[in-house]
Image (cartoon, rainbow, N blue to C red):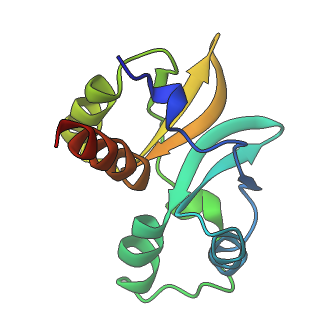
Amino acid sequence: MDEIGDYMSSPVLNIDSESTIQEAGQYMRVNGVGSLLVKEFGEFVGMITETDLTRRVIAKGLNSETTKVADVMTKPILSMDRYFPVDQANEFMHQHNIRHLAVTEEDKIVGILSVKNLVSYYAKSFRMAE
């Protein structure tokens, strides 16, 4: 059975909680990712996603140059251990209506599993079934 760790994105990209939304958006674009973990005083405290940018900043007319990541990030961080089956992660993400899941190993975040990663998994499974 395939495990989350086989499909997660790693290393984990992060941004400081005091960074602006504009900085977060630019960092995501440059790195081709849809989420960043948010750090405050060296600890992960939340996650900022493309959905957060759209729904909590743009849709509300907030200024991306002055709004801080900490003001719109998603928290708490939802996570699963890297050795859980991909199907279980998919179900968890569906139940919690999230598109990005932190992946842990020995309680340390080591990656992110995204809907994009799940598409790769299910596409591979579909091709193998043919």
Residue 92 falls left or right of residue 69:
left
Q: Which residue lies furthest to the right in this view?
A: 42
Please tell me which residue lies in front, 50 or 85: 85
Q: In the rendered view, tell whether residue 19 sits above or below residue 113.
A: below
Q: Residue furthest top?
A: 106
Q: Which residue lies furthest to the front in this view?
A: 130
Residue 49 falls left or right of residue 29:
left
Q: Position of residue 87 (x, y in %)?
A: 26, 28
Q: In the rendered view, tell whether residue 98 sits above or below residue 33.
A: above
Tally the marks.
0
Residue 5 falls left or right of residue 68:
left
Please tell me which residue lies in front, 93 or 61: 93
- Residue at 46%, 78% (x, y): give it: 57
Please tell me which residue lies in front, 115 or 80: 115
Q: Position of residue 60 (x, y in %)?
A: 37, 83
- Residue at 26%, 46% (x, y): give it: 127
- Residue at 43%, 89% (x, y): give it: 61
- Residue at 35%, 16% (x, y): give it: 1
Which picture quadrant has residue 65?
A: bottom right
Q: Position of residue 97 (x, y in %)?
A: 24, 47
Q: Where is residue 53 in the image (x, y as percent from the top left)?
A: 47, 73
> The C terminus appears in which quarter of the rendering?
top left
Q: In the rendered view, tell whether residue 15 sits above or below residue 20.
A: above
Which picture quadrant has residue 111?
A: top right
Please tell me which residue lies in front, 5 or 61: 5
Q: In the rendered view, tell whether residue 20 sits above or below residue 89.
A: below
